[in-house]
Image (cartoon, helix red, strand yellow):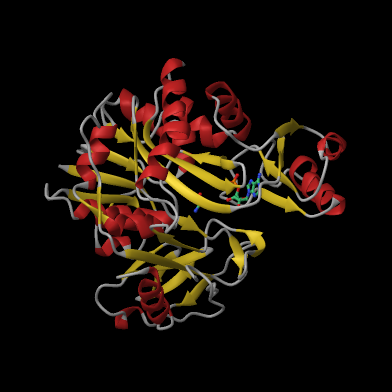
Amino acid sequence: MRVLVVGAGGREHALVRALARSPQAPEVLCAPGNPGIAQDAELRPEGDYDGVDLVVVGPEVPLVDGLADDLAERGIACFGPSAAAARLEGSKAFAKEVMAAAGIPTAGHWTVRTVPDGLAVIASYPAVIKSDGLAAGKGVVIAADEDEARAALHEMLVERRFGDHPVVVEEHLAGEEVSLLALCDGERAVPLAPARDYKRIGEGDTGPNTGGMGAFSPLDDFGDARIAEVVATVHQPVVDELARRGTPFHGVLYAGLMLTAEGVKVLEFNVRFGDPETQAVLPRLRGDLLDLLERCTRPGGLAGARLDWDPRAAVTLVLASRGYPAGSSSGDVISGLDGIPGGIEVTHAGTAERSGAVVTAGGRVLNVTALGEDRAAARSAAYAAAAMIEFEGAQLRGDIAAP
Ligand code: AMP
Ligand code: GLY
């Protein structure tokens, strides 16, 4: 069995490692990968699927662009939804329309195309302003007042920072966030362990949104009964609705949830694994990830699938480069990677190799994951390991997985 992971980040590194643990002893490839992934998989150039039995797509962009459809035409099995189903992530307006059709609770919202129309629909602040297109987690602004709202609407609709897309203005929801992902085979949704992600760059959830600065799993207040309830009211209705429309969802459906005083509401859907949630969730999965992902590619293939989890806690920290998330820096030499103790997983995200040294090459650079008997133990092990890694301008939030 030859499995190829598409992507080059920390999530793909975690997928490569989890697939390599399969008892099927697969040959694991990655395209294009990065210097860390190269230690665990054979790297291929992008677009080279020669002799590959299963393609596992990491990021959303190729899915929205139709990679799963292209591979299907070539007779290559692909873990990841078709372009039609990937619109759940590619267009927030489409996701809202599916949620309305399927009766899924979410924030009230309006789609607007001009700055005055945007300001006119906002009844109170804070208000949430989202670009309708893909923006790597950075196209969302929580505007505290009208000035911030005007600036955000201007950036998205006039300057078109994220391309030529309308804007979704949303009611602000207060509460704790949970990332609950489910594997889907076109007919049913089977949940993965929940995780919490830290979206803002600054401690205490301050500053701009990022792709995610850290994560932990499991969540104390989100046990099996709660998971089953959310899957029944969120993930399964989406799978049913897309099947009804003739565009069944195969792959992993990521629901970003807010636990509000009025119950669970959906913030967003993604059509791929979370980053960095995957780095905290997959080390806890017992059993054969390769088998599970392969089953998702077949209609009804997950029948009888049961997922089993290591009861220990996992904490993942993200080391980001100077300037992230507004920009990023590259070429800063990374030291300390050789001294990391066994049992700690360091996955590479934005790294490159230059004259034999590993250097920064992107916003989120490295992830450090530790398992522990409880969250506090995992947290202190992760921070101790992260403290050994150095590069110029490194950013690390100090409050990931804090009690
Ligand atoms: P999204 O890309 O839609 O998930 O938004 C990114 C992040 O922005 C979320 O994870 C939340 O932290 C925040 N966010 C998005 N929508 C809302 C909302 N309606 N109310 C409060 N926070 C939100
Ligand atoms: N960590 C957030 C995401 O993967 O979208």
Q: Can you tell which quarter of the image residue 383 is in?
A: bottom left
Q: Is residue 232 above or below residue 399?
A: above
Q: Is residue 63 above or below residue 31?
A: above
Q: Is residue 94 above or below residue 396?
A: above
Nearest the camera: 207 or 106?
106
Nearest the camera: 179 or 199?
179
- Say left or right for 40 vs 9: left
Nearest the camera: 25 or 108?
108
Q: Can you tell which quarter of the image residue 381 is in?
A: bottom left
- Say left or right for 264 vs 63: right
Seen at 63% across and 30% down, the residue is 93
Seen at 22% across and 36% down, the residue is 305
Badge count? 0
Q: Is residue 33 visible?
A: no
Q: Residue 192, how many percent across, how many down? A: 34, 46
Q: Residue 260, how many percent across, how many down? A: 60, 47
Q: Can you tell which quarter of the image residue 41 is in?
A: bottom left
Q: Residue 86, how many percent across, how many down? A: 47, 32
Q: Residue furthest left?
A: 24
Q: Residue 391, how many percent across, how many down? A: 49, 79
Q: Is residue 262 above or below residue 82?
A: below
Q: Is residue 196 visible?
A: yes
- Quadrant location of the N terminus in the rendered image: top left
Nearest the camera: 193 or 396?
193
